[in-house]
Image (cartoon, helix red, strand yellow):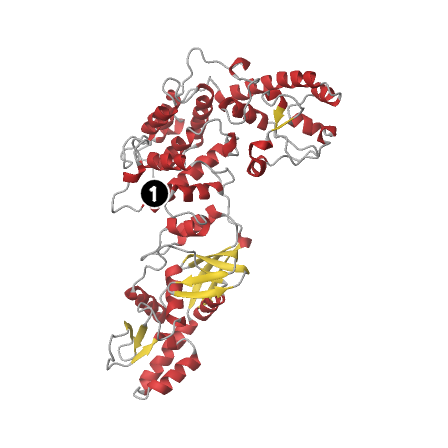
Amino acid sequence: MVKTPIDRSASTTTTWDLQHILGLAQSGKMRVPKFQRSFVWDTDDVIRLFDSLYRGFPIGTLLVWSQPLQAGMSKFGPLSFSTNDEPGGFMVVDGQQRITSLVGTFLSDAENTDERFDIQFDIEQEKFVKRPPYDASGKLIPVREVLESRRLLAWLRANGEDFTEEELATADNLGGALRDYKIPVYVVQEDDEQLLRVVFDRVNSSGKPISRAQIFHALFAGTSDQGSPASVVDQVARTGFGRIDESRVVQSLLAIRGGDVQRDIHEEFSSNEDPLIWYDRTETALNKAVSFLQSEGIPHVLLMPTMAPVPILAAYFGVHANPEPYLLKMLSKWLWRGWMFGFGRDSGQSPAIRKAVQAINPKKGGANPAPAFEAAEELLRQVEPGADSGLSADIFRLDGFSTDARLGRLVLLALLSLEPRSPDGETIDVTKALDEYGTSAIGQFVASSRTSAANRGFVLPSWPVEWKNSKNVEFWESQAVTPEAYQAISADKQEHFLSLRLSFIQDLIINFYRSKVDLNFTARRPVADLMVKDPNEQR
């Protein structure tokens, strides 16, 4: 698969010195996401950071996201700053611990400093130390005093009368080393969450970082609780697919962990497991599932004939993150056959979901999941059409249409394949329309029965009342209206119009689903999997 390159004009690599970083933080132009656990470093971590700065050691690249920021309170560990709107602000994606250590050390006052940031420089031993709990005999300089030359000079005049010339030079070198240190910064300016996640994974530092799940929940998930079905719903909704039900998120998480998806989520995690990590994995798998569904022509949750495939696809992509194209084709046939003939022909949806997940990830804990081909092959076997299965207009209730029913949505997906247009000829953004109007985006052509599929289509409430006067040929064709049907609706011959459109839709549906289901398709292992490598072939 061809990778889409980063738009380099929209992302930059630069360096910031410590004073610039402090200025951005204090002014509110740079902020960190809000976490339940905001700062995890201890004093020793902060000391190691400053030792690296003093010695000129690399401390890693900061990753920031250029975004407009709203007015409010900005927190860096125990410090808070009142901020204004910042149209060109920066949100810290990776580097919170380092930046908070700098802000806490240099911008805290002497009386209210968190002990983790109350770092001293032992001038005699040339090392950073904790401030002792009592007046020590050593020559210690509070690190908060050394960054600005005038402030360091003032402190030395007041407290350095016992310092030797060599020690004064060491203090000056300390200040110079910190002032001159420049930290590499990668600035992402694209509004692309997935790209941001990829970059984060590449540059994420070691030590005690806050997890990827916490970072991206704080950046994108709004007000919902971390590590919850609601937070995953919020995240997946960002794909434009709409809001899936929280119960499907829970099913998906259990499917990814393996075993029976009907077990109680409240007793799922042991005391040494972090649920947030699993919700992050669930979100990632669901995003892949949604991407697959969108590639199959299902742009929004309101067009899903049934939701049964969601946890099953989450399980598959949770185990096999990047399946080969042929495996995706197998999943495609499984999806459409399941919707047409039923995922649980003999047992209902819940047992069918359980059985499908067992075929992919049979044991809790994810031990011994099925290989990618075998899992897809078994899924196809489970929706194998019976001897009486066939595709004809009789299996679609075109006279009992409902936007909430499986068959109604199958009809809509067939109509969507025509890429419906508005009366001015512009292609309808169906995702946007469904988000804005819900199922009201599925309107009527004439003032007749709403339960006839012949009278329903992507007719938006925002269209002008005279929309039927449009003479745009592409509009009418994209709405499954033939020239003869157009003549009928123009002459206000409603029943004749509905009869003509019904006949066209019947043919459209049969051809559309014959292609999707493809009863002649049989799963065969890809040729590449059957090839035996030459043991003498160089790797």
The answer to whether residue 386 is above or below residue 532 is above
The answer to whether residue 204 is above or below residue 328 is below
Q: Residue at x 37, y 61 (%)?
A: 97
**Percent coordinates x, y for residue 437 in the rendering:** 58, 36
**Percent coordinates x, y for residue 526 in the rendering:** 40, 27
Residue 415 figure quarter: top right
Give 292 or 311, whichever is nearer the viewer. Answer: 311
- Assign a secondary structure to mark 1: helix
The answer to whether residue 48 is above or below residue 524 is below
Give the residue type at disc 1. Answer: Trp
Residue 354 figure quarter: top left
Q: Residue at x 39, y 41 (%)?
A: 229
Residue underneath mark 1? 278
**In the image, 355: left or right of 461?**
left
The answer to whether residue 92 is above or below residue 354 is below
Q: Quadrant of the C terminus?
A: top left
Q: Residue at x 32, y 84 (%)?
A: 166
**Percent coordinates x, y for residue 321 in the rendering:** 39, 37
Asked whether residue 320 appears in the rendered view, the answer is no
**In the image, 186: left or right of 443?**
left
Give 491 or 276, whichever is nearer the viewer. Answer: 491
**Percent coordinates x, y for residue 376 in the rendering:** 38, 27
Identify the residue at the far top of this view: 388
